[in-house]
Amino acid sequence: MAEYERALGELEHDQPSATLSVMMTGFGLRLDPHLCWENLRRLSKDAADRAIGLTVNTVTPGYTMTEMVAAVPEKVLIKIRGQIPLRRLGRPHEVARVVAFLADDASSYITGQVWGVNGGLDM
């Protein structure tokens, strides 16, 4: 949190607008959604109250086909795919597109949101 405060202080003086995208991951575990929402709400409200043009959003990728996931045994991957409504793993570019959108000026009116890129796993 101290790092966040330092960064906000710099933004107040140096930059007219910015985006803070927080990537929340937890391979093989479920993050407490209430805790994620509370922290996101606190950060985004604080940034909005300072009126410095900072938007704060969170991207929560689901199981994504990376080198780490590729090392998981196929039997386990079959079970994982079975739990995902779209019945497949995500691709890195699908997560990257959401992050790129949130970092773009086109999303300057979006703040305090959780973007689940997880094939519907959190529905």
Image (cartoon, rainbow, N blue to C red):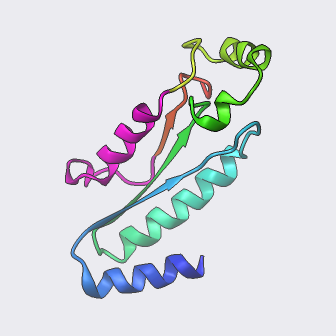
Which stretch did the figure color magenta? 91-113
Q: Residue at x 33, y 80 (%)?
A: 11
State left or right for residue 108 relative to residue 118: left
Image coords of residue 33 (percent x, y): 67, 44
Image coords of residue 121 (percent x, y): 62, 24
Q: Quadrant of the C terminus?
A: top right
Q: Residue at x 54, y 57 (%)?
A: 40
Q: Residue at x 61, y 36 (%)?
A: 67
Q: How many marks?
A: 0
Residue 89, quarter of the rendered image: top right
Instruction: Please determine whether, in this image, residue 96 is positioned above or below residue 105.
Output: above
Q: Main secondary structure of the magenta part?
A: helix
State left or right for residue 1 relative to residue 12: right
**Residue 61 or 40: which is nearer the viewer?**
61
State left or right for residue 6 relative to residue 16: right
Instruction: Please determine whether, in this image, residue 49 is positioned above or below residue 83.
Output: below
**Residue 26 or 31: which is nearer the viewer?**
26
In magenta stretch: residue 36: no
**Residue 12 or 71: which is nearer the viewer?**
71
Q: Residue at x 32, y 83 (%)?
A: 12
Image coords of residue 90 (percent x, y): 52, 26
Q: Quadrant of the N terminus?
A: bottom right
